[in-house]
């Protein structure tokens, strides 16, 4: 079971309740998050479980006792109403559908600044760009690393745009959280549990991409790893799954977007650039994502896609982006929302 | 290469051109469709091919000579502008997004009539329902067969609604084409080449569902089998592919919808009922389908889903349908179309 | 439930038992096979089912009454001990592992005869070759059809070799069964239910390839369609499934081979040529198939693979075949069998 | 291109060659491994590349210059003859097929010692057991961690058995390498590039499991990350991929085993326990793995599978293991090898 304690609970109360659980035969796991303490108690052979759970729920320090029936708990829609993630004054998960746009990789300080300015002019409030790039081949361009992160930070400070960028190692989470606004966990790291825990401990907004071969349940369990550390500032992001189809780089799974909106209280973004891998499919799938209920759309945009250091074949130009923006605005309105 | 002859070409002209091809070393395949004759000429070792193709293209009876570079020819967007399939006065592939709705299976004459009337009142012009039901298990309900087809025909004659229904065997194509308006080829029969050929020969409008494990290219090649018989009245229909995900029955692939709209001139419909297999996902994925550019949406609707003879878990009620209709109308308008 | 009647049951007895079932509220389906009559009775809302089943089982004409708990019945290992399919004097499913070898397609009468002779000399008792070829593209070589079948028949009569060849249409089943020894149902037709029924009615040995995207359960249900017509002479054949991997044409699934040997009483063959699509993988996967428990191995062998009309890249030469034969013999002995 | 320098090359020589490359316009990446230095030079727009490569290859400090045509270089079969990984006196990749056996997770010190002794008596030289357990759910048993590692180390010292165990975080690589003999990188971490690099730097034997949705090429590129750090002591391990099939937990892909034996010089092990997830399929798939050419088989074995803390449904008993051992010995001999 999961025992959610009330905010402000004392160390002694945590100790007492842990002791009671252990005496009963439970394996006890205390997660002290920023906002609240959650105790996970696993006891497959414990007797008279239900009566004991009822007792616990009446303790003054206990907010909630939940049986572990479903595999994910803290991120499920049963646990909480809709979550809105606040990134400064940008709200993700509210009425507005939020755009995140930018190049695949940071390619230089001046270029990053120019793109940030152009996006701001286009009404985009979140810049996406990778400083640390996970690459299948050790011989591919791996991003500018820390320098890239500093370029992003500089562009952010100069323009006020928010930045989402990927972190690949647990030890870098603090640094990335400090120099950006949203810490991204990429598709290949969805099962990097230590990274998930560090992202949870950081308290920073986390954009959690779905593993390209992860089921919806596994994706929500990865989010649960973050939430268990006391961080519910999670934006899920669908980016395509691996199927037998070879025409598209991945198969963007909008079923999952609609499903996760019902199974979880977390906001969901969609990345049609990686999801399709083809520039000519980005616009129709972006429209479809908004119609399916996405809270955000993440787009690879570059002033000159043909010269982009990576992912040129799936990156749209600023001009195409401006045209797509209008289309998305119309679809957002058709489903009772607006474009943020 | 493909040699498309002009309409009204004479038997002698066909014979002459075939002879020339054979003398040059080609295997020759003459397809006499209703509208025109198409000659396929396969000659992997023929010399001076290009000059010969040029010669052929100047013959008075020849409309077009196309090299076989891409695997599908007659259905490709290079071959023709947009196709609009006329089903009586209903146009599929034009500005209007067309709804097709009804129960999974025909369940009785009176019930079919009542549903047809209710759908007509809701502005739906095409009724979908299965008389012949392909079932994975030989012990499952296999549909009412011919009787079911007659019930559909009766409802159609009584109300004027158009009917789309599945055919499973080559020998039944004529009968189904006579008693309905659109002949459906189901997902399990996408590679039933004889059935495709018969559907081609019938000249009737054909709704060709994508095989649940077929690539986009294979799907278009299946359409090519129909087109090669001279029948371009083809409506492609995406209905979900098989992936590792188990939360949904299938993974509705809207990437394929957007891709096929670009690769082919044929109209594309989407079936979110089978595509997701979950009633709570039908509405968001229907909206997404329209936003992605679908020309039609095919929905399982039943007055009492809980009592439906099959597919109850993915069938929406009339009430939900009426509400969804409004949502789809709004999305259609947002993408510059209207709901038909 | 399934009611298996005893051999030699009278028409009146069938009628009586059907009547009892209908009165009780069951939908009744009588399958009159060559060997025995099987009655399927579907009655989801029938009351006091178990008592009624017990009554039926005591009727003198009833051999067995089985509840429909598992989806497949007649082909399950619960229903029967191991089945040995007799193809003349060749036994498939016994102690011997049987080789089936030959070109992808029949390429001519003389060539077929020469291959048959060469295979006979190499101790192979079953020739595989396609007269009717299902092809993804309508422009690909579709086989010699009836003529090809006659060539196969001629080679068979001249040499005494047994022949397995594919049938694609229900109406051709009788003809193919007459001119060959084993009727093959290909991967694209595993869900062609009418074809399955016709193959069942023919009584001929049937080699049923697994659909390239069919689950093990669906494969066994397809076999059930054949068995329900009274024909248990079924050889299952694994030939690779469609996955995300692109290095191999398909992913040969030996898990399924081992699983089906436990779930069903039917013999199982393996086709590593289509399963891998790469000539260099045929030998190791053939050895693995025998080690996993396969009752037969089906190989594409051609005197000159480079000139084969189809599938050259996965076809081994006679020389490689002779060498592989020795390897398979050693592995067969290691698992307590011999090569047939 | 990849420039492999000769052993014992001086710092100055490295500097000189790097300078030359940079002047020519290459991005230069120097990997100083334990055994040798490898320089990766990426220069997509460099002119007269081939002449320059030829010049470099004549430098006295250069062993080899390889164009980057194939994506993986150091692990490819073109680069080197067969690699034998020495784990103390146990050789993996030689004539002997090596067994690795043990429980899924370390469950206690005494139990680990008893299993180690029982395995030694059965001729097994490598014990597998997890101290750090990657779990999909944060609420599942996560292993005993460091304590578990110490238990393994104690059993290893007391009995002389070799130990393979998983490492999940880059910072733990050194510790795990010290307390065990082979460092395992699990399926979920195949794309954890920092972990791969650390494993490379450690110089310890590494067992690299295939990602459950990784292509063969991606798997070899992950191995390349390790090799690039100068560590070629890599044992690849196939453990099943994710497909549409639900009967088995994964689909063990023996095609990949045979393919990788040809594409790479590295030894390959197979894990049929995770690969199938079903105890009744472990024996046939183990036999098949050896027949397909596997250099090692990794098995979950537990004295009492029903009480195992994890993976009980795929764990065989000691008794079954002893029986399987004999079967594998017979198959190994049939393919010209012996069981180690």
Image (tube, coloured by chain):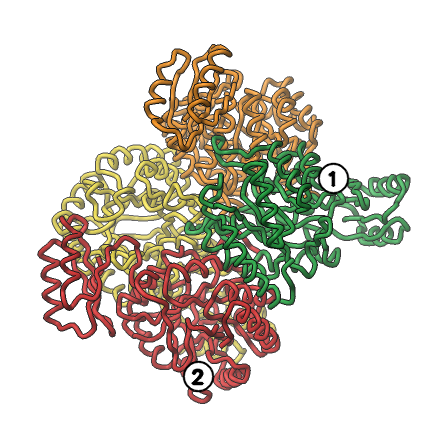
Chain colours: A green, B red, C yellow, D orange
Side of B127 where C189 appears, left or right = left
Q: Nearer the viewer, residue C69 or A339?
A: A339
Q: Nearer the viewer, residue C31 or B163?
A: B163
Chain holding disc 2: B
The image shows residue A96 at horizontal and vertical percentages of: 67, 59
Would you place residue B220 above or below residue A277 in this image?
below
Q: Secondary structure at mark 1?
A: helix
Name the mark nearer the viewer: 2 or 1: 1
- Bin the neighbour count of mark 1 within 10 Å (Cα to Cα): few under 14, some 14-19, many 20 and up: many
Quarter-of-image position of residue D134 = top right
User: According to the image, label 1 marks what residue?
Assistant: A201
Chain holding disc 1: A
The image shows residue B210 at horizontal and vertical percentages of: 41, 62
Side of A220 where C244 appears, left or right = left
Side of B211 where A236 appears, left or right = right
Q: Which mark is residue A317?
A: none
Q: Nearer the viewer, residue A57 or B178?
A: B178
Quarter-of-image position of residue A23 = top right
Q: Is residue A113 visible?
A: yes
The image shows residue B130 at horizontal and vertical percentages of: 45, 74
Q: Which mark is residue B151?
A: 2
Would you place residue B87 above or below residue C278 in this image?
below
């Amino acid at each position: 079971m999961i025992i959610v304690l009330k905010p402000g609970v004392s160390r002694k109360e945590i100790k007492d309740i842990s002791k009671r659980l252990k005496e009963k035969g439970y394996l006890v796991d205390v997660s002290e998050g920023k906002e609240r303490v959650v105790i996970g108690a696993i006891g497959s052979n414990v007797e008279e479980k239900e009566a004991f759970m009822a007792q616990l729920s009446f303790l003054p320090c206990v907010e909630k006792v939940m049986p572990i029936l479903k595999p994910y708990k803290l991120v499920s829609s049963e646990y909480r109403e809709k979550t809105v993630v606040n990134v400064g004054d940008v709200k993700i998960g509210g009425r507005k559908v939020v755009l995140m746009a930018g190049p695949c990789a940071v390619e230089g300080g001046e270029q990053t600044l120019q793109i940030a300015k152009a996006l701001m002019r286009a009404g985009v409030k979140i810049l996406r760009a990778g400083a640390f790039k996970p690459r299948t081949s050790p011989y591919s361009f791996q991003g500018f690393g820390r320098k890239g992160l500093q370029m992003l930070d500089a562009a952010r400070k100069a323009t006020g745009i928010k930045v989402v960028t990927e972190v690949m190692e647990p030890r870098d989470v603090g640094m990335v959280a400090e120099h950006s606004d949203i810490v991204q966990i990429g598709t290949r790291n969805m099962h990097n549990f230590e990274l998930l825990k560090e992202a949870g401990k950081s308290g920073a907004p986390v954009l959690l991409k779905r593993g390209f071969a992860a089921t919806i349940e596994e994706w929500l369990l990865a989010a649960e790893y973050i939430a268990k550390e006391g961080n519910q500032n999670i934006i899920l992001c669908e980016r395509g799954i691996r199927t037998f189809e070879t025409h598209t780089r991945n198969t963007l799974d909008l079923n999952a977007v609609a499903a996760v909106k019902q199974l979880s209280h977390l906001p969901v973004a969609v990345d049609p650039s990686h999801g399709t891998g083809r520039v000519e499919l980005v616009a129709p799938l972006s429209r479809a994502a908004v119609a399916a209920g996405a809270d955000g759309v993440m787009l690879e945009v570059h002033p000159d896609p043909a010269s982009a250091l990576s992912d040129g074949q799936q990156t749209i130009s600023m001009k195409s982006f401006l045209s797509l923006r209008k289309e998305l605005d119309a679809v957002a309105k058709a489903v009772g929302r607006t474009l943020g």
